[in-house]
Each structure stands twice: as structure tokens, then as C-alpha cells.
Image (tube, rainbow, N blue to C red):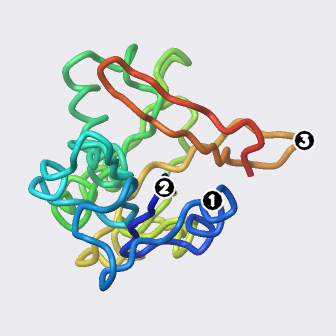
Amino acid sequence: MQAVLRIDSTPETVPDALAAQGWRIWNQDADSEDDWHLWFRCGGFTRKEMASARLHQRVNRIAGAAGVCAKDRLLRAMSRLRMAYGADAYGFHPEGFCLPSERHRFQAACSAASVPVAPSDPSWAVRDGLWVCKPSDLSRGRKVCVVRGPGDVSIDQGSVVQRYLARPLCANGYKFDLRLYVVVTSVRPLRAFLYHDGL
């Protein structure tokens, strides 16, 4: 039986890669509503869509995982965990704020005088006055900029601002990021697969 891919919106690489493995694309006019094996879309699925999947069908999202897939939701979750369990457990990410909802806290943080602290506190490496601003809904580094404070940011647009690290980890003197491809197939039990070639 040939595997069937149902797609709403996706980069061309997904159907191309699956077609190379013998998959065919679901046809709305010729196939029945439930005649597919993998439903792939760039956006999320409704609870109803996820619940209607049959045993042989999969979607490319895990219910409830949106909180770790969006910059603003992830920042809020990390901030809550840091408040609950302290900086020793969750202080590995810089202070940040979600705009526009936390604009007053961001303004207060920019106004507050910075006091150097011990190296065990992650804020020891923060360069005063600089923040990295990232649009909440973009990816691949688009429209990321370094700002000095609220005056440099469009407070009304959905963004995440985080303190700029003065001494980030460097490779041969250059800042870098890791683009890792991981497929999480289950959260309970946790099961994930890392694509070793990366970017």
C-alpha cells in the first residue's frame, strides 16, 4: 500500500523528500477525507482535527507543544520555571520580556542600574544597555536586531527582547548558533531523534 501525504502548506522539500521515498500526495477530489497517512502543515491543528486522526494516521504536531515552539510562549514558560525553581536550575537563559504585554517591565529593567554579581549568576555576562529584539512570529533570524532600550523597539508589535550577552560562547572568535533538526515522536515516554548532519 502506497503511503499518502496530505499537505496544506509546507516547504517543497517535505513532499519532494517523501515522493523520493514512494509517497504520493493526497488529492482532495479523488481521495476520501480519511485516505492519508501523514498530514503535514506549517501551522497548528485544531483539537478536532487531531482527535479525528485514525490509528494509522499522524500529524506533524504534538498536542500542547505550541508552548515550546513559539519564542514568546517559550520565554514565558522559562520565566515561570525560573521563578518557581530559581536561577540555579533555570538561569541559563538571559532575562527577557514579551512585547507589548510586558512593556512596562521592559522599561523598568532598562531604567534600573545594573549591579555586577557573582559568576554563578547568569547575569554576570550581560552587557548593560543592549537587548536582542526578535519578532515573535518570524524565524531564521529575520528582523532580529540589537537595541538599546524601549525607544528603539516598536512596542506595539509582537516581539521578544532579551538581554544581550557580553561574552557568548564563540567558535574561533565568532558567535554562532546551532540549527539542529529533531523529530519528537512522543512526549510520554519522551522519544526524539536527532538528524546528525544538521545545517
Residue furthest to the bottom: 29
SS for dot 2:
loop
Q: Which residue is mark 3?
A: 172
Circles 2 and 1: CB atoms closer than 8 Å = yes
Front position in the image: 68 or 28: 28
Question: Can you tell which of label 3 and label 1 is closer to the viewer?
Answer: 1
Q: Which residue is mark 1?
A: 22
Q: Which mark is residue 2?
A: none
Q: Is residue 107 above or below residue 8?
A: above
Q: Which residue corresponds to the image point at 40% horizontal and 62% vertical from the top-left?
A: 40
> Residue 116: percent from the left, percent from the top?
49, 29
Q: Which residue is mark 2?
A: 3
First of labels 2, 3 by sequence position? 2
Circles 3 and 1: CB atoms closer than 8 Å = no
First of labels 3, 1 by sequence position? 1
Q: Is residue 148 left or right of residue 37?
A: right
Q: Is residue 97 left or right of residue 164?
A: left
Q: Quadrant of residue 99?
A: bottom left
Q: Which residue corresponds to the image point at 67% horizontal and 47% vertical from the top-left?
A: 177
Crowd tier of the residue under label 1, counting other residues whose Cα lies within 10 Å: few below 14, some 14–19, many 20 or above: few
Callout 1 amino acid? Gly
SS for dot 3:
loop
